[in-house]
Image: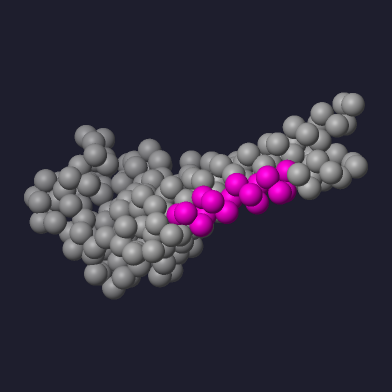
Amino acid sequence: MRQKRIKACCAAFTGLTIASVGLLLGFIAWRYLTEYPSSTLIAAVMAAGSVPVAVGIAWLLRRRKSPVWSVAAAAVCLLLCLVVLGSVAWGKVTYSRFGLTVIGALPIPVLDITVSSSGVLWFRDKNHQITLSEVRPLVDESTEILIIGNGWHGAAKVEEAILDAFGSRVHVLRTGEALRAYNSHRAAGRRVVLLEHTTC
C-alpha cells in the first residue's frame, strides 16, 4: 500500500511538472515571440501537446509494478527544476551563438532576454526596437551598468532617449561582445543589467 502511494505521488509530480513546463513554454512563446507570425501556432502546439504527454507518462509510471521508475522520473524532474533555478540565480552566460543563449545550464533558444541587476532572468518582446519605456523599469539607482546587446549583426535599433537618460552607464554592443562584457562586469561584482537581442 505504501509503495502504491509513493508510486502515485511520484507519477503525479512528474506529470504535473511536465504539463506545467509545457504550458509555461507555450505562454512564453505566445507572449514574447511577437516577431514570428507563427508564434500563436507554436504556443498552441506546446501547450496542447504537453498535457496529453504528461498524462500519458504519469499513466505509464503508475502501471509499472515497482515504484523505482516513478521515483527516478520524479527525481529527474526535481533535478531539472533545481538546475533551472540555480542557473537563473547564477546569472552567468556560459554559451552563446546566433539564436541561442545559455544562462548557467539553462538553454534559451531564439527568445530575447533581460537580466536584472539582481540576476532575475526574464523575456522581452522579439522585436528590433529597444525603447526607453522598455529599459526604464530594469534600471534603478543602484544599477552601475546597462548593457544592451543589439543583435549579432547590430540590427536592433536603440532609442536615443536611452542614451540621454542613462548616459555613460549605457553600453550598446553587438550581442557577442555584450555577453562577454556582462560576464566580466558580473564577475567584478558590479550591479549590471543586460538586455539582449539574440538574433540579427
Whether residue 101 can be seen here: no
Percent from the top left, x then y, of residue 107? 51, 57
Residue that appears at 39% across and 52% down: 30
Q: Between 139 and 188, which is closer to the camera in this rendering?
A: 139
Residue 53, magenta (yes or no): yes
Q: Would residue 80 appear left or right of 27 to someone viewing this image?
A: right
Residue that appears at 24% across and 39% down: 137
Percent from the top left, x then y, of residue 123? 37, 49
Residue that appears at 36% across and 50% down: 31
**Quarter of the rendering containing residue 6:** top right
Range shown magenta: 43-58
Residue that appears at 90% across and 41% down: 66
Please give the count of numbered marks on the rendered protein: 0
Q: Would residue 177 appear left or right of 51 to someone viewing this image?
A: left
Q: Would residue 8 appear left or right of 110 to someone viewing this image?
A: right
**Quarter of the rendering containing residue 181:** bottom left
**Quarter of the rendering containing residue 116:** top left
Q: Between 109 and 158, which is closer to the camera in this rendering?
A: 109
